[in-house]
Every structure is written in structure tokens, then in C-alpha cells.
Image (tube, helix red, strand yellow):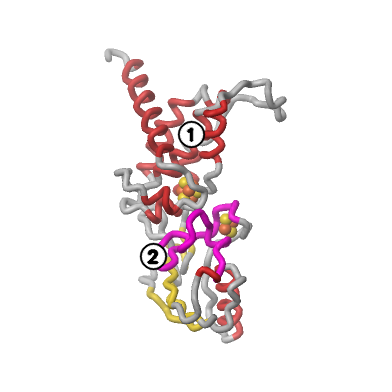
Amino acid sequence: MNLTLRIWRQSGPEDKGRMVTYQVDDVSPDMSFLEMLDVLNERLILAGEEPVAFDHDCREGICGMCGMMINGVAHGPQRGTTTCQLHMRQFSDGDTIDIEPWRAQAFPVIKDLVVNRSAFDKIIAAGGYITAPTGSAPEAHSVPVAKANADAAFEAAACIGCGACVAACPNGSGMLFTAAKVTQLSLLPQGQPERYTRVIGMVEAHDEAGFGGCTNAGECTVACPKGIPLNTIGRLNRDYLKATTKRADNTPGS
Ligand code: SF4
Ligand code: FES
């Protein structure tokens, strides 16, 4: 396939940035999207030009490092797929493909397609852990967990922290990510001691980090490569309501 790429180039956080057009020929349909960018970068390096900066690590759809807007869609045209697992057979010979970084206030661009997602780390640091000493892996049946809770916790735990939900949201909200990280702990026995301080801490960290509010647009769950469902945010909202009610009840004089 011969393709025309229009790629966002930005030399640093202070640069205004612009779209630059590149021609890439002889692309195999079996290449992954990132391999196609590798080919472009090899050619740029050989020509003495600056390669396109993009994030990646595992290239197996599990680390959450990769991510870019492809023709205006987070992670590109294939549902439930990270950019590294997207293959060029999803495109056609002669296509023009627009490639941009995540666009969100809380994810400032560092360079080209690389954004700073440390705002997610701040949310995790505010409560995305347990302090119960769990020791080594317990015997599987020693702590009973209802099947429905185990399934929902596992579903939430599939979040890889890629940020596509934020990039797809018209408000730049990180609520699907936050809800996944709250839910994977709030449904399990080990997560109960900090259940209500956790949800308040993580929601406050979300808001302080510059993410927008959730208005149930639902774009996040469509863009999510791990299919985290929208009702995960409903679970967070219920826990948040209970937590703030408890906090009000425990306030002296209330
Ligand atoms: S909820 Fe989905 S889209 Fe958002 S960070 Fe987690 S895996 Fe990525
Ligand atoms: S590089 Fe790890 S999920 Fe894509």
C-alpha cells in the first residue's frame, strides 16, 4: 500500500505544532500501525530528519503506553484495539491518514505524539491501592467473593491506563479511568478498609489534575480498548455519594 500520512509535529511543549505530510510506500497490510511508523522513522533518520516521537512499550495491547488519534478516533478505526494491535489491513491503498496526539487539557503534549499522562499517576497516588497486609498469594477459596463482584472487579481491572477515554471525551474527563481504578478495589474484600476515603481522594485528585467533568456522553467506553463499561462510572458515583454522606454524618455539629 502507498499511504499519505499527515502527522502532528511539535518539537516541545512550547512549540505551536503543525501537521506535516509524509508519503510512505510499500506498506504491508500485515504491519502493525506502529511498525508502519517505524518504517517512516527509519526513512526520516536515513534522510537526516527528526523521527516522529511516539509512546510504546509492550506492543501487545497490555501496557497502555501507545495511543494516538488516528483519523480523529482514539486508537483508530478498530473497536477494542490498542494502536499497537491495529494492523494496516484496516486501511486501503491510497488512503490519507491523520495522526495526532491525545488532545486533553490534563495531557499536555511533550513532543509530537507523546503526551504527559502523569495526571493519571496523581489519581492512583490518591487512593488506587490497598494497605491491608495481604502476604503471599492466598489459597483461592479462602476469601469468598460473590461471582458477580469478582467478574465486575476483573472487568474493571482490565484498564491499562492508556488515556483513550480522556482523548475521546468532549469534556476531557478521566472519569472512566478513575471509576475503573476505584471499582477494581471497591468490589473486593481487601479493598473495603479504604473504600470511602479512596473514592473521595481519587475523585478530588481527578478534578485537581485538570480533567473535565463527566456528562455521560459515553464516548469513553466506545474508545476504550479494554471495553470498560459506562456503568463503572455509575458504581463510582454510588460509592462517592455514600462516602460524602458518611463524611457529612461524621462531621462534628452536622
Ligand atoms: S478506561 Fe479504557 S480507555 Fe480509559 S485508560 Fe482505562 S483502558 Fe484506557
Ligand atoms: S504498546 Fe503496550 S498497549 Fe500498545
Q: Residue 113 vs residue 234: left or right?
A: right
Image quarter of the C terminus: top left
Say few, some or many: other residues with alpha carbon within 10 Å of mark 2 (under 14 / 14 to 19 / 20 or more): some
Q: Residue 127 vs residue 62: left or right?
A: left
- Main secondary structure type of the part rendered in magenta: loop
- Residue 195 screen position, x and y as percent: 47, 26
Say few, some or many: other residues with alpha carbon within 10 Å of mark 1 (under 14 / 14 to 19 / 20 or more): many
Membership of 68 in magenta stretch: yes
Secondary element type, mark 1:
helix
**Residue 72: image tag:** 2
Q: Residue 153 vs residue 167: left or right?
A: right
- For the point 55% across and 63% down, which residue is it? 86
Residue that badge 1 annotates: 183
Mark 1 in CB contact with mark 2 (< 8 angstroms) = no
Q: Is residue 118 visible?
A: no
Q: Is residue 118 above or below residue 27?
A: above
Stretch in magenta: 61-88
Q: Is residue 101 above or below residue 4?
A: above
Label 1 – label 2 distance at C-alpha? 29 Å
- Residue type marked 1: Thr
- For the point 40% across and 42% down, which residue is it? 230
- Residue type marked 2: Gly
**For residue 102, what is the image quadrant?**
bottom left
- Residue 246 screen position, x and y as percent: 36, 19
Membership of 224 in magenta stretch: no
Q: Nearer the viewer, residue 172 or 51?
A: 172
Identify the residue at the far left of this view.
254
Image quarter of the N terminus: bottom right
Q: Is residue 125 above or below residue 172?
A: above
Which one is earlier in the sequence, the residue at label 1 or at label 2?
A: 2
